[in-house]
Amino acid sequence: FFWKSAEEEGSISFWDPHFREYLDSVQFGIPINQAVMDYFYLSSFYERDCNNETCAMQNRTRADEETLKKMTGIQYYVVDHKLAEDFTLFIIQKCRRESPEKVIPLAYYYILQGTIYRAPYFMSVLSTRLCNALYYVKEALYRLADDEQELREEHLENAEAAKVPHSYATAPVMLAMKSVLDTFPIEQEEVPKPIKPSNKRKLEDVSPGPNPKRQKL
């Protein structure tokens, strides 16, 4: 047996294809905690010099809590479990017992669907969460910077377009209007042309008047 650090244990896992057989042994009167500890014994997480193994060598079970409370040293306990048809979870605590009342937790392991993992430390979880949060904050800042650059370029383009003469700026609009008018022409009704009155008087309509008399000076 070689002792492993928390980092090394956190990077490995254990699985045995006979895990379901250990759970089925409960049907034959074996306590669930004892079946789980017997399965945990197969993994490299289990320290062979712990008090649980001492109980096993004394023809007791590895989960004999009454005997373990009378001993001091490294011990393992099944602190919680959840069983379902398609889901199994067991939580095992590794601790150092100094007295029947004083227990110092050292690590936690969980068995999920037959695979054993070591639970990470709180600081490790916190550090990972903070790193993930900072990553997304960094990505958000980069995205904002890119959007700001696009807005600046668009603003410059609009400013340059504002300097173009009016005739060039309205040319696309006029072409679009012409295209619409060509596609949907406007039907106009014919308006009769007004008759202009003639200022010339006909000769036959003018009757000769009396000759004007001349005044003597």
Image (spheres, rainbow, N blue to C red):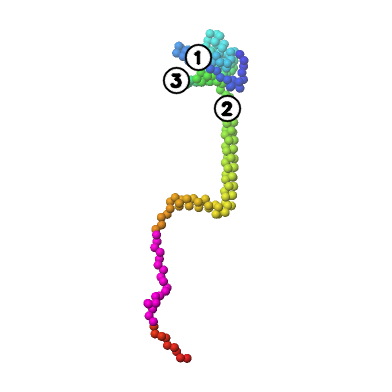
Mark toward the viewer: 3 or 1: 1
Measured along the vertical axis of the image, is residue 202 above or below residue 152?
below
**Residues in magenta, as a range:** 190-208
Q: Main secondary structure of the magenta part?
A: loop
* Mark 1 neighbour density, 10 Å: few (under 14) some (14–19) many (20 or more): few
The residue located at (53%, 10%) in the rendering is: 60
The residue located at (53%, 17%) in the rendering is: 15
User: Is-magenta flag for residue 202?
Assistant: yes
Q: Which residue is mark 2?
A: 125
Q: Seen in the image, is 213 located left or right of residue 145? A: left
Q: Position of residue 78 (x, y in %)?
A: 52, 18
Mark toward the viewer: 2 or 3: 3
Q: Position of residue 102 (x, y in %)?
A: 57, 19
Q: Please indicate, yes or no, whether residue 103 appears anywhere in the rendered image.
A: no
Q: Position of residue 6 (x, y in %)?
A: 60, 21
Front position in the image: 104 or 47:
47
Q: CB of mark 2 within 8 Å of CB of mark 1? A: no
Inspect the image, locate mark 1, and give the three-letter code of the amino acid beneath it.
Answer: His
Q: Which residue is mark 1?
A: 18
The residue located at (41%, 57%) in the rendering is: 188
Q: Please indicate, yes or no, whether residue 96 appears anywhere in the rendered image.
A: yes
Q: Which residue is mark 3?
A: 85
Mark 3 secondary-structure assignment: loop
Q: What separation in Å lies between label 3 and label 1 (alpha carbons)?
A: 17 Å
Q: Earlier in the sequence, mark 2 or mark 3?
A: 3
